[in-house]
Image (cartoon, coloured by chain):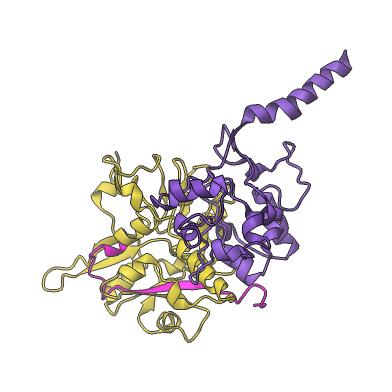
Amino acid sequence: MFGSGLALALFAGWYGFPRILYRSETQPLQFSHAVHAGEKAGMACGDCHVLDAAGRFHGIPGTAKCAECHSAPLGDSKEEKMLVDDYVTPSKELPWRVYSRQPDNAYFPHAAHVALAKIPCAECHGPYGQSEAPRVYEVNRITGYSRDIWGPNISGIASHPWEGMKMDRCVTCHATHGRRDGCIDCHK
Amino acid sequence: MDSEHGKNARFGMVIDLDRCDGCGACMIACAVENNVPPGHASATERTGITWMRVAAVESGQEYPAADVAFVPMFCQQCENETPCISVCPQNAVEIDPATGIVGQIPQRCLGCRYCMTACPYHARYFNWRDPAWPEGMDRQLNPDVSPRMRGVAEKCNFCHGRLHAAKAKAAAKGSREIDPADYVPACVESCFQNAIVFGDLNDHESEVAKLARGADTFRFLSRLGSEPKVYFHSTRPWVKEMAESTLTRSKKENGHG
């Protein structure tokens, strides 16, 4: 009796709860990082995700960046045709769901981490540059933030260093590297 | 200090009260830069939010000796026994050892307003309401500064968003040392009279450090020993005397109810 109650509670907590908490959304385009960053196109992360001379990181590139190569379809994929017809030709921006969107008061300078500390992109982003398609975007129904902020494991335990984007992850890494930062160094 | 963190700075200001003509451009620039919403219709000098406020102070003498000084008053970035830090029960105020800037952390603030009582300069303000901007004005918000919520105190932080931007620009070039020209607070930039000089007081060759050491430079309420990093300059004796007394305040502010 106790065993079945425990099993039911664990099932509800581990399987049921995340399904209630998160709503799934699909990205507007099944973009393949593997094609672009792999051998076929051989692009570097910084070719599209630009860190400019003023130290501002531009994140997801706009349609104009796609149009530099895809003003007309290069291949015969359905996704590429959709990109050209629905977004590039009418110069419309893709309504990407942003996995990394943080609360307004969080400040993360890519310049300090990438250009100064020379941390490789994959150290925080994992093997996302080799993915065939964007993950399903899961949004927390209560907070409105992506599941990537908490991390895929509902218990909050990360099995890879790039899982989860909570403040304790920042603090742990900064402490390991002996950084002494005040609150307003990472908050605005 | 060590190369890993870059050298420590002590940012400060020198304001020439003989140059300030009280135009109020600094107040506007400050509010726009730091996403301070327009005051509510019922806001008073006490309940409104003005990180930077220019006060008109009269000498009290009869004509022809009558004189007026305009005093921009804002957080003086006290360095010693910083009053707001010592009273805060939440550790929501801290002094950054790398810059000397007294920072306010709204998310930690519980809204007791003890810091406002403790501040000798009346430089702290309270959000009595959630910030609201008129239709259209919300589109000009500064993305580098997060608006504060109802129920927390706030104050000048030497345009910390601009320091972030300057640091990011230096970092993009692989440097930890910011270019002083990249970090200029909004009030300094907007002053038509060039009455405000900003910079690193630790850099003895900087203009601000030279002016701070110079003649006729003083600080408000220096007898309290809180060692503010905002200096004022005036050759007028009565202005210097006034700096050691409390500011003349309007009848509205001093009144009860």
User: Residue, x 53% and y 68% (percent of image)?
Assistant: B168
In the image, residue B225 sits, relative to residue B37, either above or below, namely below
Q: Position of residue A168 (x, y in %)?
A: 69, 50
Residue A150, quarter of picture? top right
Instruction: Kindly give the residue lying farthest to the front in the view shown.
Output: A76
Q: Is residue B67 magenta?
A: no
User: Residue, x 28% and y 61% (percent of image)?
Assistant: B55
User: Residue, x 59% and y 49% (percent of image)?
Assistant: A31
* Front-lying residue, B152 or B35: B35
Q: Which residues are magenta?
A: B1-27
Q: Position of residue B164 (x, y in %)?
A: 51, 64
Q: Which hue belongs to chain A?
A: purple
Judged by its main secondary structure, the magenta piece is: loop
* Front-lying residue, A42 or A120: A42
Q: Position of residue A124 (x, y in %)?
A: 68, 56
Q: Which hue belongs to chain B?
A: yellow
- Res. A105 visible in picture: yes
Which quarter of the rendered picture does the C terminus of chain B lie within? top left
Answer left or right for B91 relative to A3: left
Q: How many marks?
A: 0
User: Residue, x 60% and y 67% (percent of image)?
Assistant: A112
